[in-house]
Each structure stands twice: as C-alpha cells, then as structure tokens.
C-alpha cells in the first residue's frame, strides 16, 4: 500500500473534521491517505455520546474551548496543540489492524520507546496511554483516526473531561494523569512537528498533489459546527 499525505493547517476542529471527510474520494486501489492535523482546546466526543455528560461543557465554553463530535464511536478526548492527530484512510477491505498498530508503535520505536498495543485501541508506554484511536467506515473507505499525546495540557484534560464514575471505580483510577502520559516525558524536547515529520518518513508518504474542493470543505465545516450535529448527532 502506498501513502499520500495531507497536512492540516488549521487548528479549528470543525474544519479539520471536514477536511478528513473531504479526503475520502482520494482513496483508491492501493492508495491510502495519511492526514495529520491539530485542534486547539477542544473536547471531541464519539458519534453516539452526549456532550453534556462527557465534559464540563459550561466551563469549557467559558474558557474559550470548543465541543465537537466525530463520526466514529468511542469516548471523549481532549485535543490541544500539544497533540498530533492522525487519520489513516484506506479501502475497507485492505485495512490490517495489526499493521496499523505495528506502524504506530514503530514510529515511537524511533525514539527508543517500547510502545505496545493494549488491545483496546490504545498504544501504551510503561503501561500508560500515549495514543488512542477509533474507526468508522463510509462508502467502502475505512478511517482510523487517533491522537498522540506529545506535550498536551494534562491538567486541562482532567479539568474538562468527566469520565463515568463506574469507569473510575472499575479501573481504580483517581486521576486522568495516573493513566496517561505525554511522549515528551520519555523523549525530552520532542515536539509535534518532529513527530509529524518522522511519521511521514516511516510511512514513506508522498504529498497529495490535488487541491481539496473549497466548496465541499466549507459545506462540511458548516455541518460539523452545527448545533444539530454537536448536540444531537443528527445526520
């Protein structure tokens, strides 16, 4: 499989989700898309979640943060500029879960880290989560997207996210920071930009030469920032 890459230049979550969806038509045959992007101060929830139940919504809005809903399932996550988000798009029949996680672990192996896939869509280092991901399929194209915690504000993650009490009890977790870690804790000085470049090298990706249709991106951005989608998940 050969990879084409697209780098997001915006920190707006609605535009970034729109770009991800706009990239679907560029997947064909053995060509996959690697999309790298960042959001600024955003809580992103899964398709079927209730935003008010997953975060301290009023506090998030007062602080200038944004709520967003993605098309995949899974739990709520915190994004800021200390995260590197990745989306890997390929034909659904060509996806290989083992290869997917092996490649992501191999990226971290470049820094001497013994990263492991824990079987729950997470990648860990020393037992702490440094990356989580989710998946959805549309029109025969699989999109797996996730995030690497590079130097994110873990105090903000803890402040705004509200994990269900039963999850905290089951895992005996008292703090978000007891179970997640930034990669910069293990690789001092690691920056999002360096990780992004190393991902492109490891995937052997070439730049996507085509321009995304501006009208399509604009229309999809309006959809993802609509009250109906964020608060109701309406198609």
Image (spheres, rainbow, N blue to C red):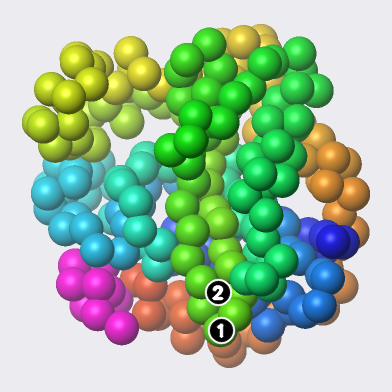
Residue 37 % position (x, y):
61, 52
Magenta stretch contains residue 229: yes
User: How many residues crowd around disc 1 within 10 Å: few (fewer than 14), some, or many (20 or more)?
Assistant: few
Q: Say few, some or many: other residues with alpha carbon within 10 Å of mark 2 (under 14 / 14 to 19 / 20 or more).
A: some
Q: Residue at x 47, y 86 (%)?
A: 219
| Numbered label attached to residue 21 | 2
Q: Quadrant of residue 166?
A: top left
**Mark sitting on residue 183:** none
* Of the pair 119 and 111, the residue shown nearer to us: 119
Measured as percent of width and height from the top left, residue 113 is found at 69, 15
193 up-or-down from 3: above or below: above
Q: Residue at x 40, y 79 (%)?
A: 222
Q: Determine whether, in the image, residue 142 is placed left or right of residue 159.
A: right
Q: Write down the residue under mark 1.
A: 139
Does 75 appear above or below 189? below
Instruction: Find out whether residue 76 is within the magenta segment.
Output: no
Q: Image height check: is 77 above or below 149?
A: below
Q: Is residue 109 left or right of residue 135?
A: right
Q: What's the distance in space between the residues labelled 1 and 2, CA to CA?
A: 11 Å
Task: Identify the magenta region.
Answer: 226-235
Which quadrant does the N terminus fall into? bottom right
């Amino acid at each position: 499989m050969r990879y084409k890459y697209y780098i997001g230049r915006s920190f707006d979550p609605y535009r970034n989700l729109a770009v991800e969806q706009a990239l679907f038509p560029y997947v064909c045959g053995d060509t996959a898309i690697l999309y790298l992007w960042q959001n600024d101060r955003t809580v992103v929830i899964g398709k079927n979640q209730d935003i008010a139940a997953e975060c301290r919504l009023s506090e998030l809005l007062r602080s200038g943060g944004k709520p967003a809903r993605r098309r995949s399932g899974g739990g709520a996550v915190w994004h800021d500029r200390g995260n590197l988000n990745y989306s890997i798009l390929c034909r659904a029949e060509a996806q290989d879960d083992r290869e997917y996680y092996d490649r992501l672990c191999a990226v971290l192996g470049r820094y001497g880290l013994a990263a492991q896939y824990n079987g729950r869509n997470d990648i860990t280092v020393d037992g702490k989560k440094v990356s989580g991901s989710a998946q959805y399929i549309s029109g025969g194209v699989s999109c797996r997207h996730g995030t690497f915690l590079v130097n994110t504000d873990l105090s903000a993650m803890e402040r705004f996210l509200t994990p269900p009490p039963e999850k905290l009890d089951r895992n005996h977790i008292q703090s978000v920071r007891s179970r997640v870690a930034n990669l910069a804790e293990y690789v001092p000085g690691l920056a999002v930009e360096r990780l992004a470049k190393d991902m492109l090298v490891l995937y052997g990706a070439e730049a996507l030469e085509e321009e995304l249709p501006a009208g399509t991106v604009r229309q999809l951005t309006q959809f993802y920032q609509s009250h109906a989608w964020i608060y109701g998940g309406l198609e």
